[in-house]
């Protein structure tokens, strides 16, 4: 190797040695398995003590847990006799037959047995649509997202409830204007659809009349309103048609099904509301800004249970007397309001992370503020906060357990009810049930948190050019 | 934009559809109209609905006699007292859970957060397992687990778990016998037999601890204690000033501890121990004497502090990792050992990152204390939105009050932690 000399205008300042000195090998004490163990297990007295303490703890906890759930567990049987120490003749661990016996309740609650295929379709369809959505490399993302967020909820609604909501009144009906049409055609109330068309036309006209305030052409505004009503009408139509499915009241829903319905509805419904609130909070109009802030801080400041009580006991009082809202729907409203406040803060974080240059760039192109948000800022902000949204979802998934308190039987509620079944009362039933529920919640939450970390890494890599 | 073009024509602005001021006025007026309409219709509907159900609105019901018992009261309460008094009992119970839970969660959380950064792989793995498991199980699940699976299956009072010097010595004696030190074992056993009954029992009836009984002389001890606290405060200020002026360290902590403990101890001995303890005793099927902590409280506090500690551990870990490695190296190069480095250099800087998220965890714990209703812990929510709502049917008033209380607790906690945060925040020149 030749010497590396550094020359500056002042002359030669550094002469590197012609031969670099070969690096010495590391001392034996810090090499290999021995060195690793010294550094990580017993480098000093305190380290040795810590290691011993940790090992003792592991020995005290892990073998008994394994013995309870696997080696000493009873795997087959039809009632409590199978899990009693007297019958088995040894110490008995987990009583798994209890879980098999309650399996249908865990999955479907008290959903009628003959109709459970509907729930199965919803489960399978959900998995089929969700998995490709979660795999970053899968193609047709846009189509997939549309199917999952647009069409799937509707299909799930019709399958789970039985559809055929038989809608008689649209807005005008509540003012007594039902046009005297009571005829039905194909299970649809004509009066409802006439009202719907009239309201659509009226709203379109109203919007067209004020559209110049927002710099939109009247015809464009009217068209987009009519489009919105068309989509809305299509949704209502699907709910209105009689598919011949038996109606299943939400009182009979339960188990995993309710847990998933509440968590998914909460997150999907809170997303648009949360985005609106986040934009409102950053608005320059004082009334918009402060009403958003009050809304967000209020819902974030109270416990979810009070929100559920609010929805269950107070909301019905606030609505006109002729409305009776379903118990599950009330809870969904409460959860959505609560989740949207949290979602708004997540989205706000994303909006704040967008560099000012993006706003300025959009303005320089002459985009109006609504377009700037829709085309430039929001897509980037939402992409940034996907991990935050997943974390919100994990929180919501854990929070669904609270519906137990307003007598809706989710996964945990069903299991808790199962504990009181005298057919299965054994000393280990409760531990088995908690162990099983714990595994399910852990698998879901841990899986989602790993997924969100994976996304975070991916998105981070995408941002570093 | 349109404005810019118009400004060329002169100061006289013509009326325009798209004038930003006009647009914002239109938006705000319509929002105001919608809000007013919503408020009015809610109000009108509520009036009509209440009238139909025959419920008188208003807060007069707070003065009516409650007529239900409460299993844990920090202030005197009986069934004949008013709903307002029951509300106060519930509020205190909520605050008790929140305060004890926050203290426990902070201790466990800091411990686990530091343990997760340990060099020792066993400790690190254990702490990681703790964090992952506690964070990924719903809090209500954990509360029910402690209540239904652990505390309910505990043995009855007769076979309750005993904690104290006597059972500990007995266990030591057993261990000594087991490893062949019979002499030592017998000595421990003898010592154990000579000791007073254990002070702490854990059974399916909850936790029983000794009750301190204060005699009038105790006020003198309290006064001495108060003087000591003031003295310690002054010593700390003086030590700080001297350190800033001369650089000399003063062992403030140990001196402070001595100043607080010793005078009070000496005075109380001189007065002949004005505090005595009423030890719980097993009589018949239950304990007599001592303070009984109901199992609902034990389950709630355990579950909430263990759950929240998982989050606090992650916050602490992130906070410590946020302090750059150069700080540790600089402290080491100044000759500080690991302990002082952590205490004097790393933790104070990490606090800046830790405090804001820590605040929200404290708030979460307080809000989650409402979950006690699932096991029947008589907190504000269970007493008020549970029993009182059932009895009176005053849904609007009761839920509004409950929400308002939690909102106020949230705001106060945020304000306090905000003040603390300002104190520890980095002061930039």
Image (cartoon, rainbow, N blue to C red):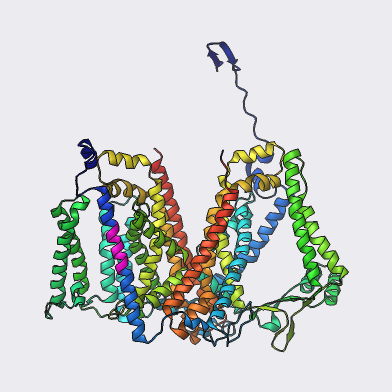
Q: In the image as oriented, which residue stretches furthest toward the bottom? A: B284
| Residue A20 spot, x, y in % from top left | 60, 21
SS assignment for the magenta stretch, majority: helix
Q: Is residue B9 shown in magenta?
A: no
Residue B291's image quarter? bottom right
Q: Is residue B216 above or below residue A442?
A: below
Does A277 sit left or right of B319 as displayed? left
Seen in the picture, residue A22 relative to A329 is either above or below; the reply is above
- In the rendering, at what x and y percent does residue B82 appear? 55, 83
A160 left or right of A305 in image: left
Q: Residue at x 66, y 58 (%)?
A: A54
Q: Residue at x 56, y 83 (%)?
A: A84
Foreground of the two, B139 or A121? B139
Q: What is the count of numbered marks?
A: 0
Residue B151 image point, x, y percent: 61, 77
Quarter of the picture holding the N terminus of chain A: top right
The residue segment tinted magenta is: B28-37
**Residue A236 point in image, percent of width and height:** 21, 70
Q: Is residue B93 above or below residue B352?
A: below
Q: If the image is split into quadrants, where does the C terminus of chain A sit?
A: top left
Regarding residue B169, the answer to whether it shows in the image is: no
Q: Is residue A395 visible?
A: yes
What residue occupies the far front of the structure in this picture? B12
In depth, the one of B79 and A379 nearer the eye is B79
In depth, the one of A375 and A267 nearer the eye is A375
């Amino acid at each position: 190797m030749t010497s590396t000399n550094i020359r500056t205008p002042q002359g030669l300042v550094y002469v590197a040695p012609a031969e670099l000195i070969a690096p010495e090998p590391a001392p034996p004490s810090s090499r290999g398995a021995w060195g690793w163990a010294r550094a990580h297990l017993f480098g000093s007295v305190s380290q040795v003590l810590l290691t011993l303490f940790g090992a003792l703890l592991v020995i005290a906890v892990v073998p008994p847990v394994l013995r309870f759930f696997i080696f000493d567990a009873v795997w087959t049987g039809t009632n409590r006799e199978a899990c009693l120490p007297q019958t088995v003749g040894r110490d008995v661990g987990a009583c798994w037959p209890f879980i098999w016996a309650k399996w249908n309740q865990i999955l479907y609650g008290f959903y009628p047995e003959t109709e459970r295929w509907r729930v199965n379709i919803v489960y399978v369809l959900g998995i089929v649509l969700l998995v490709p959505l979660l795999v970053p490399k899968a193609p047709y993302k846009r189509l997939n997202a549309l199917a999952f967020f647009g069409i799937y909820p509707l299909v799930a609604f019709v399958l789970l409830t039985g559809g055929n909501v038989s809608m008689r009144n649209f807005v005008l009906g509540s003012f007594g204007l039902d046009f005297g049409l009571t005829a039905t055609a194909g299970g649809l109330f004509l009066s409802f659809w006439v009202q719907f068309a009239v309201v659509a036309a009226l709203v379109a006209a109203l919007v067209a009349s004020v559209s110049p305030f927002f710099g939109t052409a009247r015809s464009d505004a009217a068209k987009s309103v009519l489009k919105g009503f068309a989509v809305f009408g299509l949704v209502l139509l699907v709910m209105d048609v009689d598919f011949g499915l038996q109606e299943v009241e939400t009182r009979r829903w339960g188990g995993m099904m309710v847990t998933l319905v509440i968590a998914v509805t909460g997150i999907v419904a809170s997303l648009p509301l949360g985005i609106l609130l986040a934009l409102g909070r950053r608005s320059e109009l004082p009334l918009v800004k402060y009403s958003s802030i009050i809304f967000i801080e209020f819902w974030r400041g109270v416990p979810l249970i009070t929100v559920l009580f609010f929805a269950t006991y107070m909301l019905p009082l606030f609505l006109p007397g002729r409305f009776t809202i379903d118990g599950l729907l009330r809870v969904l409203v409460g959860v959505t309001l609560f989740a949207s406040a949290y979602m708004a803060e997540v989205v706000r974080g994303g909006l704040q992370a967008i560099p000012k240059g993006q706003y300025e760039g959009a303005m320089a192109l002459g985009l109006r503020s609504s377009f700037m948000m829709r085309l430039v800022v929001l897509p980037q902000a939402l992409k940034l906060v996907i991990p935050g949204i997943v974390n919100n979802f994990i929180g919501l998934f854990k929070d669904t357990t609270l519906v137990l308190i307003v007598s809706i039987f989710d996964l945990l509620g069903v299991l808790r009810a199962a504990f009181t079944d005298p057919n299965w009362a054994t000393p280990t039933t409760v531990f088995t049930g908690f162990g099983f529920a714990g595994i399910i919640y852990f698998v879901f939450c841990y899986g989602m948190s790993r997924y969100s970390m994976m996304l975070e890494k991916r998105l981070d890599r995408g941002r570093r050019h | 934009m349109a404005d810019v073009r118009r400004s060329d024509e002169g100061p006289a602005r013509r009326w325009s559809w798209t004038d930003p001021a006009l647009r914002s006025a239109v938006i705000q007026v319509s929002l105001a109209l919608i809000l007013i309409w919503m408020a009015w219709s809610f109000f009108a509907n509520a009036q009509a609905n209440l009238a139909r159900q025959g419920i008188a609105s208003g807060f007069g019901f707070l003065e009516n006699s409650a007529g239900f018992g409460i299993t844990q009261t920090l202030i005197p309460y009986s069934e004949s007292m008013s709903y307002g008094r029951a509300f106060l009992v519930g509020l205190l119970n909520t605050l008790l859970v929140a305060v004890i839970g926050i203290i426990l969660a902070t201790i466990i959380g800091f411990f686990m957060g530091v343990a997760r950064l340990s060099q020792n792989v066993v400790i690190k793995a254990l702490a990681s397992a703790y964090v992952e498991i506690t964070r990924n199980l719903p809090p209500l699940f954990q509360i029910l687990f402690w209540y239904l699976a652990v505390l309910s299956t505990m043995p009855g009072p007769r076979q309750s778990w005993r904690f104290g010097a006597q059972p500990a010595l007995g266990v030591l004696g057993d261990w000594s016998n087991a490893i062949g030190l019979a002499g030592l074992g017998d000595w421990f056993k003898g010592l154990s037999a000579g000791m007073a009954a254990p002070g702490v029992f854990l059974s399916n009836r909850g936790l029983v601890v000794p009750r301190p009984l204060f005699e009038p002389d105790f006020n003198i001890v309290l006064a001495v204690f108060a003087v000591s606290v003031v003295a310690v405060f002054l010593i700390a200020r003086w030590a700080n000033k001297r350190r800033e002026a001369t650089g000399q360290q003063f062992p403030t902590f140990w001196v402070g501890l001595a100043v607080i403990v010793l005078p009070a101890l000496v005075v109380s001995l001189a007065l002949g121990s004005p505090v005595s303890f009423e030890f719980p005793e097993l009589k018949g099927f239950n304990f007599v004497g001592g303070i009984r902590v109901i199992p609902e409280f034990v389950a709630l506090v355990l579950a909430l502090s263990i759950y929240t500690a998982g989050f606090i551990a992650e916050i602490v870990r992130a906070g410590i990792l946020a302090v750059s490695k150069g700080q540790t190296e600089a402290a080491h190069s100044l000759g500080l050992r690991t302990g002082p480095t952590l205490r004097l250099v790393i933790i104070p800087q990490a606090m800046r990152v830790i405090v804001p998220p820590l605040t929200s965890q404290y708030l979460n714990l307080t809000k989650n204390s409402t979950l006690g209703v699932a096991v029947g812990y008589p907190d504000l929510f269970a007493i008020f939105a549970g029993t009182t709502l059932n009895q009176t049917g005053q849904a609007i008033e009761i839920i509004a009050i409950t929400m308002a209380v939690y909102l106020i607790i949230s705001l106060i906690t945020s304000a306090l932690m905000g003040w603390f945060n300002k104190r520890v925040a980095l002061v930039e020149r």
